[in-house]
Amino acid sequence: MDPAPEPIPVTRTVDCGTAKLLPDVDRHRAWLLTVDGAPQSYVDLDAPLHLEFEYVRRLAFVLDETAAPGRPLDVLHLGGGALTLPRYLAATRPHSRQDVIEADRALLDLVAEHLPLPGNCGVTLHAQDARAALEAAPEHSADVIVADVFGGSRVPAQLTSVEYARAAARVLREDGCYAANLADSAPFGFLRGQLANFATVFEHLALIAEPSVLRGRRFGNAVLLASHTPLPVADLARRAAGDAFPARVEHGARLRRLIADAAPVRDVEAVASPVPPDGAFSVG
């Protein structure tokens, strides 16, 4: 039998730029998705539990610790990419119901063509604006909201306001959890504003990030968590510390010191997240 042909990169113009699917030469049927050079997702079609990006692993820790192992969840994903976390949750928590909101319809078509989801996995895709979809979602319908929405390398302004935080709270169940991938660097003007937004709405907050990011030494990702009920900070801290790229979980008094005098950001003054420095999130 002839060996399977080597996978070749795919380049396509999508609604928000130029998308590329780049095969991983070290893992069969694994792909990196970039949009305008910025990495968006990494997917191994044969190993959905393999999570290449460290911030994705931190979001997965939240999904793992938010309920008893294997219990199905109702999850609203804002931002789709190549559907890394929906694939992970379908494998770790079968029978979960997942709605994925992705504004870029052409990107969804590209992923469906080259990186199809397994059948009957409980994942429903919606080509919609994230803020509009959140505001239209039924009240108290989600156990978890995962927000990983980037226009290129920036979180859009309509997802950075206190009104947006209130919309998320409306959709979450009383014991639900909001988890967002953000990015910033010292002096953390954007991140502090986001924390202030969610502190206005939720009683419990936490932040997962690498120590070098928290100390202001470099630009990087930070996962923001918010809930009306206590978060599993001890379990998350253990998981984050044991990762290949160890991270810390900030909460309580240390997080309040980070927020300091930051004020909530209203829709009328909201701006997109900072432009990353050259090379921070780019490949090839």
Image (cartoon, helix red, strand yellow):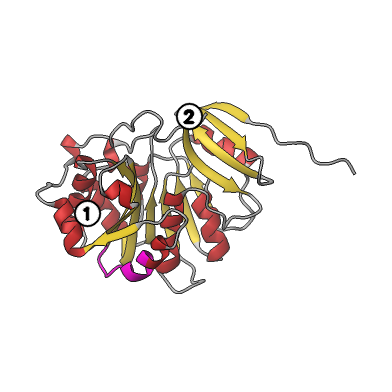
Place residue 218 in its image quadrant: top left
Identify the secondary structure beneath mark 2: loop
Foreground tag (2 vs 1): 2
The percent position of residue 160, horizontal first and vertical second, equals 25, 42
Question: What residue lies at 59% left-to-right and 58% top-to-bottom?
Answer: 121
Q: Please identify the quadrant where the N terminus is shown.
A: top right
Task: Point out the tag, 2 or 1, that comes first from the N-terminus.
Answer: 2
Query: Which mark, residue 37?
Result: 2
Would you say 50 lies left or right of 179 here?
A: right
Residue sitting at 19 percent across and 41 percent down? 187
Write the start and end of the magenta stretch as one range.
Answer: 227-237
Task: Using the rendered image of the protein, determine whether residue 139 is visible from the camera's viewpoint.
Answer: no
- On whether residue 223 falls in the magenta region, the answer is no
Q: Is residue 69 above or below residue 114?
A: below
Question: Percent x, y for residue 138?
Answer: 35, 57
Residue shown at 23% from the left, 34% from the top? 271
Q: Which of 158 and 52 is in front in this view?
A: 52
The reply to whether the magenta stretch includes residue 236 is yes
Q: Is residue 2 above or below residue 169?
A: above
> Residue visible at 27% across and 49% down?
214
* Residue 56 screen position, x and y as percent: 45, 51
Mark 1, other Cα within 10 Å: few <14 / some 14–19 / many ≥20: many
Residue bearing mark 1? 198
Q: Horizontal placement of 237 versus 254: left or right?
A: right
Residue 47 seen anywhere in this rendered image of the structure: yes
Q: Tag 1, which secondary structure?
A: helix
Indicate the amino acid at tag 1: Phe
Q: What residue type is labelled 2?
A: Gly
Q: Which is nearer the eye, 115 or 126?
A: 115
